[in-house]
Amino acid sequence: MSKPTSIDLLGTSSLHVDRAREAISILVKELIREANQTPNKDDVETVLLELALNRILSADLLSTIDVPAADNSAMDGFAFKGKEVDHGKAGNATLRVVASAFAGKPYMGSIQDGECIKIMTGALMPAGCDTVIPQELVTVSDTLEGQTISFQQNIVKPGENRRLRGEDLQMGKPAILAGRLLRPSDLGMAASLGIDKLTVQRKLKVAILSSGNELRSIGEQLDAGSIYDSNRFSLIGMLKRLDLEIVDCGIVRDDPIALKEAFCQAAQKADVLISSGGVSAGEADFTKQIMEELGDVGFWKIAMRPGRPMAFGTLKPLPGKTLSRKTLFFGLPGNPVAVMVTFYQFVRAALLQLNGATQTKVPTVQALSTAPIRKKPGRTEFQRAILGRNEQGQAAVSITGSQGAGILRSVSEANCFVVLAHEQGNIAAGDWVDVVLFDGLL
Ligand code: AMP
Ligand code: MG
């Protein structure tokens, strides 16, 4: 390795998943620090609100207005001066209804003592009024002098059922903080402030390649011992979820010259290179040799299943590289399930972190295991499962058949990972287990 980095400290014994994650995060921080020394104006861009979904906000979005812009009613009811009621006393208050106020059609007149205004939710509070009584709490009577309402005066306190100006958001205060992975609600929030463009991090360029002599592209003949390259497509799918720019470097043969050329090409163009295959014990020596020339990469044996071997580090910037920083490199194992598990355990958070996201964790929930699960202490396992409910209505999870690292169907049929912690032993039916869901609603 060309220069010692945090990744050297990990040694060659089996590495705890959490330590691997920490080492990745430390290296990503280093890359960000290095890049910040030579800031590049192209690292951010301004996009239309409707194109900002899944992008990362690059500076705090400050509110341009008070939200709400003025005091308004939180209820359909009647607005009046709070001093009309004495909350400590029993007995009725009676007020004359003198006008109506609607959302978008305010009452602009004034009111006298003993009067009230019929008001709809969202309508501006009329001048002098500070309290609203909901319509279901009053009795309305029609008299010769017009309409009156009466209600028990101790059921409403002065100032109630009114939304105050700036209560949700004050002008000049941050509405959304930098580093937010923008969700539909954030687009709505920006729109509610009248903001039509957002400044976001540019999309990371992520190069992907599959390595292996046995791999064939779709449409090619499958000769004896060959298989279709599926990993590139799982990777494309996972990367598209993050809305990144993908540079597809295709299939590369287990051949030092071809591999070196592909790695160089990726290092030239991309912020991140993700390869699959060629890092297992039998093949790593070969990849190691190339990596020694091209970068600073550690070859890890991670205490996890699936996904034990993984290479991680950086590729040296090559002459003429257009991007300001080194290329982050993930050499994922070749097994199709291992690719997906290691992507979600290590790569996803690193990509988000590298692009300035402040929240990279995915939430974990708990569910009861419907059946026993065999598990050896000393490694973290990621089983594929279906989360549903048992007859008692409790969250319950069932493993999707055979869990081999090559059986992609176990992921395809599942809706979640069951995560069995490093120290955990066998699971009995009815034990609680940690679950990470595949789909997020927002
Ligand atoms: P490797 O990590 O290269 O030793 O590969 C481990 C297993 O994953 C082998 O059975 C490979 O054939 C398989 N494999 C490697 N790359 C791919 C790929 N891109 N698509 C599908 N299977 C793969
Ligand atoms: Mg291979």
Image (spheres, rainbow, N blue to C red):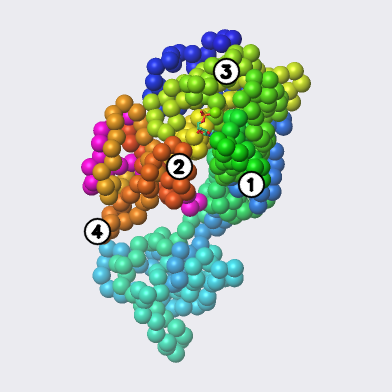
Q: Considering the numbered disc 4 on the image, is that residue within a helix, a strand or a loop?
A: loop
State if disc 2 and disc 4 touch (CB < 8 Å).
no
Q: Main secondary structure of the magenta part?
A: loop
Counting from the top left corner in percent of width and height, residue 84 is at 38, 68
Task: Tell me how far mark 4 sits from mark 2, CA to CA.
Answer: 32 Å
Kindly identify which residue carries mark 4.
392
Name the outermost residue toward the bottom.
144
Q: Which image quadrant is residue 47 in?
A: top right
Circle 2 crowding by C-alpha within 10 Å: few under 14, some 14–19, many from 20:
some
Number of the front mark, 1 or 2: 2
Q: Which image quadrant is residue 316 in?
A: top right
Task: Tell me how far mark 4 sits from mark 3, CA to CA.
Answer: 54 Å
Kindly identify which residue carries mark 1.
52
Establish if 71 lies above or below 32. below
Kindly identify which residue carries mark 3.
286
Kindly identify which residue carries mark 2.
407
* 441 is within the stretch colored magenta: yes
Whether residue 341 is visible, yes or no, is no
Number of the front mark, 4 or 2: 2
Q: Horizontal placement of 307 versus 233: left or right?
A: left
The first of marks 1 and 4 along the sequence is 1
Circle 1 crowding by C-alpha within 10 Å: few under 14, some 14–19, many from 20:
many
Number of the front mark, 1 or 4: 4
Residue type marked 3:
Phe
